[in-house]
Amino acid sequence: MNQFSNTPSQNTRILTIPNIITCIGILFAIGTGYCVFTKQYTLGFTFFIISAISDFFDGFTARYIEKRKPGYGTSRVGEILDPIRDKFLILGVVFINLKIGALIIIAELFSILASYFAREAAGHHVVTKTSKVVTIIQFILAPFFFLSQNDNLFFLFLILSCVRGISYLLEFEKHKRKSPQ
């Protein structure tokens, strides 16, 4: 049994419809990075849009299935795959400007580490509202990188990545204060 459902096998479910959608999104996110790296911006933009749309549909599908058949819509694997797709998509975009992109990669690694600490302190998977909002804003901003390649947008992207990491650190602190020492 687990905290997400009454289904004992939920944690081990790998081949779910939402996970398949997420894996397709990961492939398109990797394709985005390849296209940007090889300066095929139109195709990269198309791949980016497909991967971003998969981000919406995997979550929607997981919630829809979970309501109808608890334990079959969500999975621990999905909790891991979804942020991986998001990071691959962000990494694909940073290839447009590698100098600032390197800073964004460092900020995203900080965010991943902070989310790990928040998860450990909470004892369960943690997603902050700030992180969700940051991801949405970054997904909205990313297509503009393909069009303008404006350094100011990259700095905004960097700031947003830092905000996500800080939100997870605050979540870690909150759960750390609640737990007995």
Image (cartoon, grey):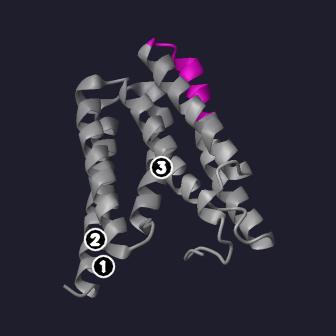
Can the viewer see residue 163 in this picture? no
What residue is shown with label 2?
172
Quadrant (top left/top right/bottom left/bottom right) for the N terminus: bottom right
The tally of labels here is: 3
Q: Residues within 10 Å of mark 2 (few under 14, many from 20)?
A: many
Residue found at x 25% / y 78%: 176
Q: CA distance from mark 3 to mark 1?
A: 21 Å
Amino acid type at image mark 2: Phe
Q: What is the magenta range?
A: 38-49
Q: Secondary structure at mark 3?
A: helix
Relative vertical location of residue 18 with respect to residue 157 in this rendering, above or below: below
Relative vertical location of residue 81 with respect to residue 42 in this rendering, above or below: below
Q: Secondary structure at mark 2?
A: helix
Quick check: marks 3 and 2 in contact, CB under 8 Å? no
Residue found at x 33% / y 57%: 164
How far from the left and from the top, in percent, is residue 43?
Answer: 59, 19
Q: Name the foreground residue: 79 vs 15.
A: 15
Q: Residues within 10 Å of mark 1 (few under 14, many from 20)?
A: some
- In the rendered structure, find residue 175 and report the number of the disc placed on it: 1
Amino acid type at image mark 1: His
Residue found at x 68% / y 51%: 18
Q: Quadrant of residue 170?
A: bottom left
Q: CA distance from mark 3 to mark 2?
A: 18 Å
Q: Quadrant of residue 59?
A: bottom right
Quadrant (top left/top right/bottom left/bottom right) for the C terminus: bottom left
- In the rendered structure, find residue 83 and report the number of the disc placed on it: 3
How far from the left and from the top, in percent, is residue 84?
Answer: 47, 44
Q: Name the foreground residue: 13 vs 45.
A: 13
Can the viewer see residue 123 in this picture? yes
Magenta run includes residue 48: yes
Amino acid type at image mark 3: Pro
Q: Residue furthest left?
A: 181
